[in-house]
Amino acid sequence: MRSLKKIKILLDSTYLLPILGVEVVDVRSVLIVLKKLYDKDIAIYYYTPLNIFEALGVISKTNYDYSIVAKGLKAITENFIEITPSPEEYLYALELKKKGFKDLIDLILYSVSLKRNIFFLTRDETLIDFIKRNNGELRYILFEKDFFNKYKDI
């Protein structure tokens, strides 16, 4: 029997925040689709230490519940695959940063997805516009709305 190739998706920090107890506006429907794909063994999810760093930065500014954050971190580390960016990926992100995009973490995540042929799920339209303006490669960007429309009926 031939096995189907799983969709490899690097998650933007937006999709990790709810796991860590932080509400994100209008993300619930996408999280439901992500869970369906995971439960049906259709997708593999990735994160980087930078995602955790970014998420903890957001959490540190809230009145967070320690136990929820702890459970969320455990869930992420046990169910998703951690990727450490390579020197090449960091350097590519730095080159892009010189072109004027402010969010270095998003550029690193984009670079990781591009260099490793893993889709990067994001809702960040400014990142996508920046990549387009700079003739960047978009084939591994999964824009949230497109992702949702493609997989909502799975």
Image (tube, rainbow, N blue to C red):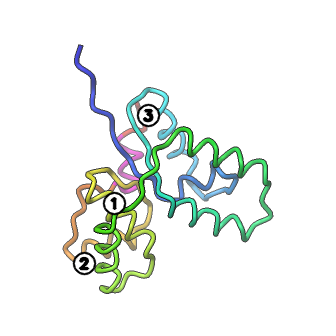
> Few, some or many C-alpha atoms within 10 Å of disc 1 (few <14, some 14-19, many ≥20)?
many
Q: Say what secondary structure mark 2 lies in.
A: helix
Indicate the amino acid at tag 2.
Arg
Horizontal side of 115 relative to 44 (left or right) equals: left
Q: Say what secondary structure mark 1 lies in.
A: helix
Q: What stretch is highlighted in magenta?
A: 142-150
Cβ–Cβ below 8 Å for labels 1 and 2?
Answer: no
Task: Tell whether position 124 is magenta.
Answer: no
Q: Main secondary structure of the magenta part?
A: helix
Q: Which of 154 and 48 is in front in this view?
A: 48
Tell which circle, 2 or 3, labels the residue nearer the N-terminal end.
3
Where 24 falls versus 99 (above or below)?
above
**Mark 3 sits on what residue?**
37
Q: Which of 48 and 144 is in front in this view?
A: 48
Camera-side mark, 3 or 1: 1
User: In percent of the image, x 39 and y 36: which residue is there?
Assistant: 43
Which of the labelled discs sits on residue 112, or is there none? 1
Where 144 falls versus 4 (above or below)?
below
Task: Provide residue 59's location: percent of width, then percent of height.
Answer: 69, 64
Q: How far apart are marks 3 and 1 (CA)?
A: 22 Å
Q: Distance between the residues labelled 2 and 3?
A: 32 Å
Quick one: quadrant of the C terminus?
top left
> Few, some or many C-alpha atoms within 10 Å of disc 3 (few <14, some 14-19, many ≥20)?
some
**Mark 2 sits on what residue?**
133
Among the 4 quarters of the image, the one containing residue 102: bottom left
